[in-house]
Image (cartoon, helix red, strand yellow):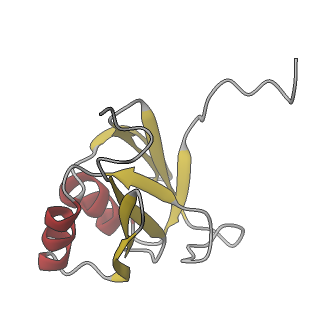
Amino acid sequence: MSGIGIKEAAFTGYPATDMAASRHFYGELLGLAEGMVFEHEGAVHWVEFSIPGGHTVALAQASDQWQPSQHGGGLCLEVEDLDAAVATLEAAGVKFAMPIQEFPVCRLSLVFDPSGNTLALHQKKPNHPECSH
């Protein structure tokens, strides 16, 4: 065996400062299905959302040890139509860190979630190595 025996990505996590706004953003605006919800002392502290393809993004109540940042790691979501996704989020008042950028095999935009974390919205071009011809 090489490495440490990683089987798969368990989840991608983001700290959230306003759980209600974050649940609206990920569940309603992005359209992800809400899964496990954990409460502590009557308040929601952890919410999981399912991403098509078998991945999970987990939102956890921000703490002194884990604060939102536009400079941290990031989740990249593949979308069917990047222009439509950006237009929908802009109409909802969502802030963007980067407008749509063109790259040789893809297009990409960076959006802020309600806590200030950055998510990438990505669309493969037909010549992308993962696209069948």
Looking at the image, which is closer to me, 78 or 14?
78
Question: At x 88% / y 17%, what residue is drawn?
Answer: 1
Image-quadrant location for residue 107: bottom left
Specify the quadrant of the image occupied by residue 54: top left
Q: Is residue 103 above or below residue 55?
A: below
- Pinpoint residue 29: horizontal percent, then vertical percent: 20, 60
Above or below 99: residue 66: above
Q: Between residues 117 and 43, which one lies in front from this camera angle? A: 117
Q: Is residue 9 left or right of residue 36?
A: right
For image coordinates 56% across by 73% down, the residue present is: 68
Q: Residue furthest top?
A: 1
Looking at the image, residue 116 lies above or below residue 52: below
Horizontal side, residue 42 vs residue 33: left or right:
right
* Residue 36, placed above or below residue 92: above
| Image coordinates for residue 114, horizontal then vertical, percent | 37, 74
Whole-percent x and y of residue 93? 19, 81
Residue 31 in view here: yes
Residue at horizontal 11 percent and vertical 77 percent from the top: 91
Q: Between residue 133 and residue 44, name the one nearer to us.
A: 133
91 relative position to 123: left or right? left
Please count the marks in the image.
Answer: 0
Indicate left or right for 9 with 77 as reference.
right
In the picture, which quadrant includes the C terminus?
Answer: top left
**Which x, y percent locates residue 87?**
14, 72
Residue 112 appears in the figure: no
